[in-house]
Amino acid sequence: MRIALIGSGGREHALAVKIAECDSCNKLFIIPGNPGTRQVGENIPIDKDDHERIISFCLEQKIDLVVIGPEKPLIEGLTDKLLEKGIKIFGPTMKASRIEGEKSFAKNLMKEYNIPTAAFEVFNKENYDDAINYLHKVNYPIVIKADGIASGKGVIIAGSYDDAKEALKECFVNSSFGTAGDKVVIEEFMLGQEASIFAITDGFDFILLPAAQDHKRIFDGDKGKNTGGMGAYAPIPFLNKKNLKLVAKEIIEPTLKAMREKKSPFIGCLYCGLMMTTQGPKVVEFNCRFGDPETQVILPLLEGNFVELLYSTACGKINKEAVGYNDGASVCVVVASKGYPDKFENGFEIYGLENFPQNIKVYHAGTKEVDGKILTNGGRVLDVTSFTEKNDLNKAKKIAYETLSKISFDGMCFRKDISDKAFLQTN
Ligand code: AMP
Ligand code: GLY
């Protein structure tokens, strides 16, 4: 099979490694890829947002399957355009991607189908006064979310009325999130541990991959600003089989049904961000794609034929036996540039990237190669990921941090507590 993978981050490096490992993959192109993906496939320097060139490339190269990593091309309809050309694609259509691209769409869907989520109201820029009045009635903290995609930065947790009013001003007056903030969802604050669950689905049937936990805040102990994710681990000890069954029945099944009834069946990876509250699991958000950095820890835990899973799903009949959980554990520590998630500098040489053992993968997230040297080229630079044969998160954590100690670059930053939340729960 000839496969094209769209994207250039750590998630795509992890997907590329997993796809290239499968016997059914004869040729893998990554558009545009990064210095890491070059080790397992051929990078093609086409911008991931240049749909026309991507389509021409896929036709010329007789691509059998396209896999789309990031949300932007999905939300902007790349799937629809490829489907029109008869190309098989793993990833939802533009209409189905609204589940991530428009938070109000996802929230209204959940309300209509009784899918557990935080109570909410939606306000437009034109209803600024109504939104302010609403802020007088709610309990604090409260969560204010830009409706559209805002690179993970469009969520503000406001501790008081004044903070919430300020957040509304950022959206409606200062346009801090561009047009994504012209509409907001104001929702109840939920307490609990977070979990990310990926459902691979052909629109009807689905399988759940091992659950992972992201670490969104920049500093240890979940302090500081929200980021794109500072690390992850899988599986989650406190999400047992009973809980997962509940998630499948109360959240995934009705969501897929709702999407079918809205004439936008969801085909691909439905990312379900959950809060494990005292009243049970509730949806924090849906994404229309694999999560980053969760993918980096979930894929090493799959045995079997990952390409067959993606291809059968894209063909409309998921092969639920294609992959299984290998009973292992995985920890990924994200290595970031000093200053991230605010301003940071690029271009520092990275040392120590050679000779890792089998149970380590150092995925490239924000790097570039110049004259044979690997340089930093992004806020999140590397995803140092370990995996163990048995489900031993302690060991996986130890290996990940030992590996990290051999890598260096100027201004290198990382959290030291990735996966500790799992241990807190199990003790
Ligand atoms: P989102 O982009 O919707 O996933 O939100 C980013 C992060 O904000 C989540 O991962 C949570 O940590 C936090 N968050 C979002 N919504 C809520 C909520 N209703 N209650 C508590 N925390 C939330
Ligand atoms: N890990 C969060 C996301 O992929 O959106």
Image: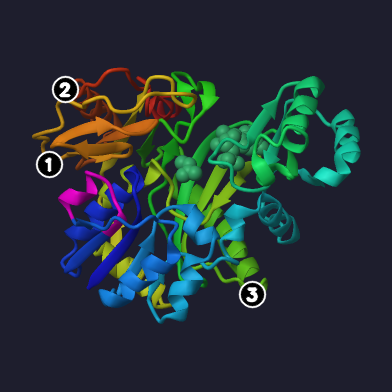
Q: Which residue is mark 3?
A: 263
Q: Is residue 321 visible?
A: no
Alpha carbon distance from label 1 to label 2: 16 Å
Q: Which residue is mark 1?
A: 358
Q: Is residue 366 visible?
A: yes
**Badge 1, how many Cα within 10 Å: few under 14, some, many 20+?**
few
Question: Is the residue 306 above or below the residue 156 in the image?
Answer: below
**Badge 3, how many Cα within 10 Å: few under 14, some, many 20+?**
few
Disc 1 secondary structure class: loop
Disc 3 or disc 1, which is closer to the eye? Answer: 3
Q: Amino acid at mark 1?
A: Gln
Image point 15% across, 67% down: which residue?
Answer: 23
- Magenta region: 30-40
Q: Which residue is mark 2?
A: 406
CB atoms of marks 2 and 3 within 8 Å = no
Disc 2 secondary structure class: loop
Question: Is the residue 94 above or below the residue 238 in the image?
Answer: below
Please name the colour scheme applied to the rendered image.
Answer: rainbow
Q: Is residue 31 magenta?
A: yes
Mark found first going from the N terminus, 3 or 1: 3
Q: Amino acid at mark 3?
A: Lys
Task: Quadrant for the N terminus, please.
Answer: bottom left
Mark 1 CB near ligand 2 (8 Å cut) = no
CB atoms of marks 1 and 2 within 8 Å = no
Q: Is residue 335 left or right of residue 25?
A: right
Disc 3 secondary structure class: loop
Q: Position of residue 219 (x, y in %)?
A: 45, 19
Residue situated in front as seen by the camera: 157 or 303: 157
Query: For residue 115, what is the image quadrant?
Result: bottom right
Query: For residue 27, what is the image quadrant?
Result: bottom left
